[in-house]
Image: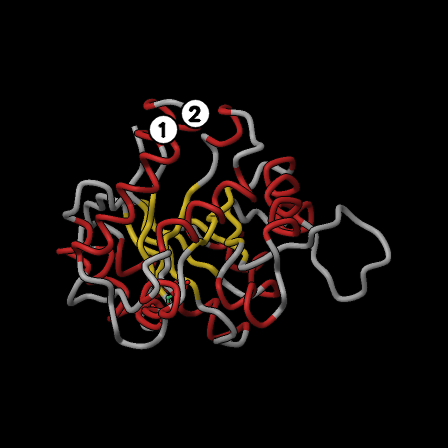
Amino acid sequence: MRKNIVAGNWKMNKNLQEGVAFAKELEAALAGKELKCDVVIGTPFIHLASIASSTKLGVAAQNCADKASGAYTGEISAAMVASTGAKYVILGHSERRTYYGETDAILKEKVLLALANGLTPIFCIGETKEEREKNIHFDVVKTQVEKALFDLSAEDFAKIVIAYEPVWAIGTGLTATSEQAQEMHAYIRKTIAAKYNNEVADNTSILYGGSANGGNAKELFACPDIDGGLIGGASLDVEKFIPVIEGF
Ligand code: 13P
């Protein structure tokens, strides 16, 4: 059975003290609630150890290196992320692809290293506005999945969480409609079934990201192929994040 997951992605926001305080506040606010999803917070690297050791919430890094170790100044390996107690790593976010030149080939290496270190990749895919206007969005998303993930065994693929984040919806206030999101999520699941099998496809959690918030989460999460969200802006305040979590 696939899991419902609501994951926050703080991006480059919050200093260490703010991050630690947020995690405590969120955990306290969720205590006693009957949650219908796993809750994950995606923090900057320097927060990981402090937050992972002081909360039961899931913790995600927002990236990891495409090399295992060695002379790569400034990089953080998957093994280092795992050693903090974080269980997830967001990989392939469109901001990493666009601003830091992350290619499908680089991401393939990152996914392998994440899995080798016991981390669950939250693997982001999604088309740009231009690609949707040209009506090539299904092909774009299929290629992203194929190139970075489809060399994995079925056993390893089963450890991946997918996040569909249309680039035009990220941070723009332009959420995909639930019909657009459901259509793409169903397509992604069909693509996984064709490559692996129905069981693997049915068990893959596929999250939606892109201007998701407390006002639209319920409708998005009610769609049969939407298993949660990857939340940017609305994950930065506890009082904005909780209504998203309660979208389930
Ligand atoms: P927003 O929710 O701010 O649009 O960001 C989505 C996102 O990029 C999450 O990874």
The residue lying toward the viewer, choosing from 33 and 190, is 190
- Mark 2 and mark 1: span between their CA atoms? 5 Å
The reply to whether dot 2 and dot 1 touch (C-beta < 8 Å) is yes
Q: Is residue 32 above or below residue 240?
A: above
Q: Amino acid at mark 1?
A: Ala
**Mark 2: few/some/many CA within 10 Å (<14, 14-19, 20+):** some
- Under tag 1, what secondary structure? helix
Residue at the image position 14 percent from the left and 56 percent from the top: 218
Neighbours of disc 1 within 10 Å: few (<14), some (14-19), many (20+): some
Ligand 1 position by quadrant: bottom left
**Residue 132 sits in which quadrant?**
bottom left
Instruction: Determine the image quadrant of residue 211.
Output: bottom left
Residue 216, given in percent of the width and then of the height, sits at 17, 63
The residue carrying mark 1 is: 193
Q: Which mark is residue 196?
A: 2
Across and down, in percent, residue 186 comes to 26, 41
